[in-house]
Image (spheres, helix red, strand yellow):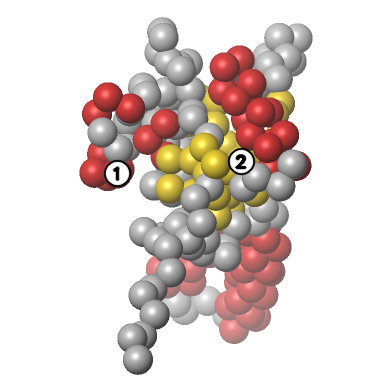
Amino acid sequence: MTDLQTVILTLSVAYAVIGALLLVVLVYARLHWSLKAVAVIVTSAFYVVSFTEMRGLLGWASSDRLPATFKLLKARIVEPHSLQGDRGSIYLWVEQLDEDNRPSGIPRAFRVPYNDRLADKTHAAENEIALGHPQGGRAADFGGGDGSLIDLVREYVTPKTILETSGGDSSTGEFTAPPAGAQGAVFTPLPPPRMPPKDEQ
């Protein structure tokens, strides 16, 4: 069981206990005041537990779909490890871009399934960033969070350039294998932001 699964399980148990305690208080409203006080204290303690465990979720990379267009800030490649049963992942730290190629200023971490070709392209993009050449990407080149192509970004790319790659299943945290012939993502030099026209005098 991974640390993330432990956190989710702890949260689930905490909220189940809160619900059970509230149900007992509602059903047996004629309990002695001391029992009601104990129920309130225990319920309050589980609220603290759930809050503490929720903070443990912060910082975990998301397996949701990537933004339609993004600036790649940093990447980490974790190769598969057959002895541990780890299929590998590629972690991307990105900023969403608006229609004028301006970054949002809010970086987020995403996790996509590992494949050799994508790992090579990600490593090449990191080298370009180290040389001072910002790199961008498109969500359509990664596929959706459910392993399917993102329909929302079809308007941004032509059908000939959409690459059928696989994403993670956000409901289970599991990855699906890339389909045969998948080329992976394409990182490209990030164009400068489009500036609004200057006022004419």
| Position of residue 57 in the picture relative to residue 67 (left or right) | right
Q: Position of residue 71 (x, y in %)?
A: 55, 49
Q: Earlier in the sequence, mark 2 or mark 1?
A: 2
Discs 2/1, front: 1
Residue under the point 49% across and 29% down: 185
Residue 74 in picture, x, y percent from top left:
68, 44
Task: Write the residue at 73% across / 14% down.
Answer: 81
Label at residue 119 = none
The one of 170 and 185 positioned closer to us in this rendering: 185
Residue 181 lies left or right of residue 71; in this view the side is: left
Residue 80 x, y percent position in the rendering: 68, 16
Q: Residues within 10 Å of mark 2 (few under 14, many from 20)?
A: many
| Residue that numbered label 2 is attached to | 92
Residue occupying the far bottom of the picture = 201
Q: Secondary structure at mark 1?
A: helix
Q: Is residue 82 above or below residue 183?
A: above
Name the residue at 42% across, 63% down. Answer: 194
One can see residue 18 in this view? no
**Quadrant placement of the N terminus:** top right
Q: Indicate the amino acid at tag 2.
A: Leu
